Each structure stands twice: as structure tokens, then as C-alpha cells.
Amino acid sequence: MPAPYTYPRPLDVRPALGHVNLMVDTFIANANVDDLRSITRSLLATGPPSFVADFTNTARSRLRQTNAKAVPSPYSLFIRQTHNSPAAPTQQLHDTLLRARSLYGAGMGFASLGVLASIVRASIGLRWEDNGVIADILAVIDADIGQAIQSSKEEIEGGRVSDISSAREIVNDLRGAVSESLADTKSWGGEFPFDRASWSIQYWKI
């Protein structure tokens, strides 16, 4: 009697987990930043919505591994003014802003607010001309705070805030830093640089 026919088992269509293909990894290691940015944007724009979610989840995981909550030293962000030279931003400030933008861009708004609050405090005591370099960079920081607040609100709406008490502390710390900056700016008659940030956090309740 012939043996009963058995149907072939369906192929396992689950994605295999492993290392990046050697040639692809070689390309990633040697491509310039502009090419990688263009390729990433193209993949995110043409891929399914789940791909964007996977990308941001992976980005957040990477940022957590690289000490996302580290606060910069306030003495490393600005060169203080002297009798002979005006205040100026340092390379450390630019690097810190890049980190803050990476954080809020990946959906880690509250972590970025902690970094930005430190920058605001570091600016207290500076003096600047209305159209000078410091005025320009502080205006940019003001806009960054607005973006970080929006990212934080989306973080709450997405259910990614596990410790709401810590989130409130971060917001209160930023609110305090902005208030201190306002008082300091008034003391020497300067133009307050964080006007939009002040309005954004004044009525924000979490």
C-alpha cells in the first residue's frame, strides 16, 4: 500500500535576523553623511507607515544607549564676554543643539527639554547686541524649545511617558530657567530671547 501523500510545509516567510550584508555594511561605513541622509529620507518616504515607526523606535533605542539624558556643563557652551570681546557660542553648544534636535526629532521630547533647559541657564549672565551672533543663536534655541515641547506632547499622546512625575519636573525646570533668563535680561535692558518658549510653557499643564 503506497504511503499517504504529505503536503509540503509552507515556507517560513518571517524575516531572518542577522547582520547587515557585508557589502551594504561597507557602503554604510564609507558613504558620506549627505548620501546617507538622502537614502534614509527616500526609504522613509516610500516605505509603509510601519517602517517609519520601526525607524523611530530603533533611533530612540540607540539614543538611550548613548546617554541621552546627559546634561552639558554650562561653562562649555558659551564664551563669556569680556571688556575686549563679546560673548560667543562654542562648538560644544552647536554639538549639544544637534543632540537635542536628534532627541526631539526621534520622539524623545522630554529628554531634549532637559538639555535645552541647561542651555537656557548657561545663557544667563550673557550680554549681546540685538543683531549679533548671540542674539541669533538664542532665537534659534527659542524655536528648538517650541519643537521639543511639541515632541513632548506627542510623546505623552503616544503613551511613551512611563514616569509622569519626572516629566513634570523637567517642564518645571525649563519653566524656571526661562523665568530666570527673563529676570536677568530685564536687569540690563536686553531683549528677552525666549519669548515663544515662555508662552508655550506658561499654559502647558501635564
Image: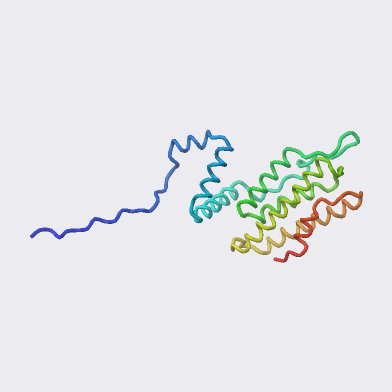
Identify which residue, 166 or 25, lies in the foreground: 25
Whole-percent x, y for residue 131 in the image: 84, 42
Identify which residue, 139 or 79, lies in the foreground: 139
Whole-percent x, y for residue 139 in the image: 78, 48
- Is residue 132 depicted above or below 45 in this figure? above
Identify which residue, 198 or 121, lies in the foreground: 198
- Which part of the image, by quadrant, shows the C terminus? bottom right
Whole-percent x, y for residue 124 in the image: 83, 48
Horizontal side of 127 relative to 148 (left or right) equals: right
Give me the residue at 77% from left, 44% from top.
137
Residue at the bottom extreme? 205
Give me the residue at 91% from left, 36% from top.
83
Whole-percent x, y for residue 128 in the image: 86, 43
Horizontal side of 3 relative to 133 (left or right) equals: left
- Is residue 12 depicted above or below 96 in this figure? below
Give me the residue at 50% from left, 53% from top.
51
User: How is the protein colored in the picture?
Assistant: rainbow
Give me the residue at 70% from left, 57% from top.
149
Count of marks, rendered view: 0
Horizontal side of 81 relative to 204 (left or right) equals: right
Residue at the left extreme? 1
- Which part of the image, by quadrant, shows the N terminus? bottom left
